[in-house]
Image (cartoon, rainbow, N blue to C red):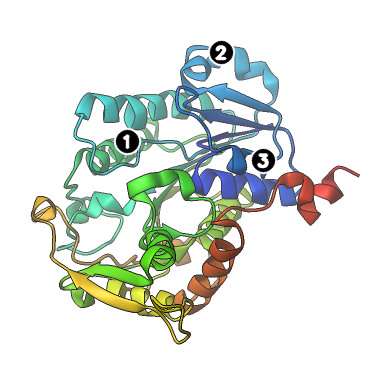
Amino acid sequence: MIVVTGGTGFIGSNLVRALNRRGERDIVIVEDLERAADARIVESLTFAELVDYREFAANLDAWEGRGVHAVFHQGACSDTMVHDGAYMLERNYTFSQRLLEFSLGRCPFIYASSAAIYGRGARGFREERDCEWPLNAYAFSKFLFDRHVRAEEKRSGGFPTQVVGLRYFNVYGPQENAKGRMASLLFQFHGQANEGGRLRIFAGSEGFLRDFVFVDDVVRVNLDFLDHPERSGIFNCGSGTARSFRELAELTAAHYSGPDGTPGGCAVETIPFPEELAGRYQDHTLADLTRLRAAGYGASFTPLEEGVARYVEVLKATGGYHPPAAAAPQAQNLNK
């Protein structure tokens, strides 16, 4: 049995699908069931149980004899505009502590950290305390849990089983439909292209650089660590390349028609930078992959041009969703 928290969310659902392709069906998805799950995402997955995270946390002892052999902790409140610190800590820190405690000595624990921990990145994007300066409640909650993991490892002289934290950079790709305002720019560009044939970017976007990483690559990193339980630590999970928002807009625009339906790409227009984001906006992100590579991960990452083309194809075909599990070739094979 594999537990995936946030399994009906963006990265979590892509991870569940990848596990399905490996033949894994005994999967328990742990979610916040007070919020309605996106039915089209749920339909794309094969799993055994769907459990509310509160119930799961309250009854962890009952899961000890269920044969859990891995925990992927992808669930969190990832809205960087939420300022309720108590809520953030309960969702992103306290629950994470419980899961770590449950997993130690029992099974691998692979969890989602965040590049938001680096703040403006003025001191670089290395997995070191000197580089970590979170700017908002979300980033701070992730920072606190990473700090807790480090402290526990030091206190115990090393973990008895695998513990891996992956600091995701700017992830994009299918199944991010339920993220709302936190969805990637590419997802938002798709909506803008369909509504008016114009993509909007903030003034100065040619200078705003991001490490855009395709969700398939993020899933591949997660599974590679599962396949190598001897590896533990906190690692950056990005492409190792920074590209500007303007570049992303222009790459995306080339796949759409103009406002009047004419071919050749839609227009890209500049809008004023919002005052409420001043001082809380990262100028750039760029994953330092030195530690990830040293741990043995050697696969290449999807170039932005290829990732944009693949994602736009899905957006145009289904609005960004994967097909239902019953219709997917890998799911049909699993059910034979």
Instruction: Estimate how packed mark 3 is, as few (under 14), some (14 to 19) or many (20 or more) residues with alpha carbons within 10 Å.
Output: some
Instruction: Estimate how packed mark 1 is, as few (under 14), some (14 to 19) or many (20 or more) residues with alpha carbons within 10 Å.
Output: many
User: Taking 75 as reference, is 15 above or below it?
Assistant: below
Q: Nearer the viewer, residue 219 or 297?
A: 219
Q: Residue at x 41, y 64 (%)?
A: 186
Q: Position of residue 223 (x, y in %)?
A: 60, 52
Q: Which residue is mark 1?
A: 145
First of labels 1, 3 by sequence position: 3
Is 140 placed left or right of 68 in the picture?
left
Say which quadrant the N terminus sits in: top right
Q: Nearer the viewer, residue 170 or 323?
A: 323
Is 82 placed left or right of 309 in the picture?
left
Q: Residue at x 16, y 73 (%)?
A: 204
What amino acid does circle 2 point to? Asp
Q: Nearer the viewer, residue 28 or 156?
A: 28
Q: Which residue is mark 3?
A: 43
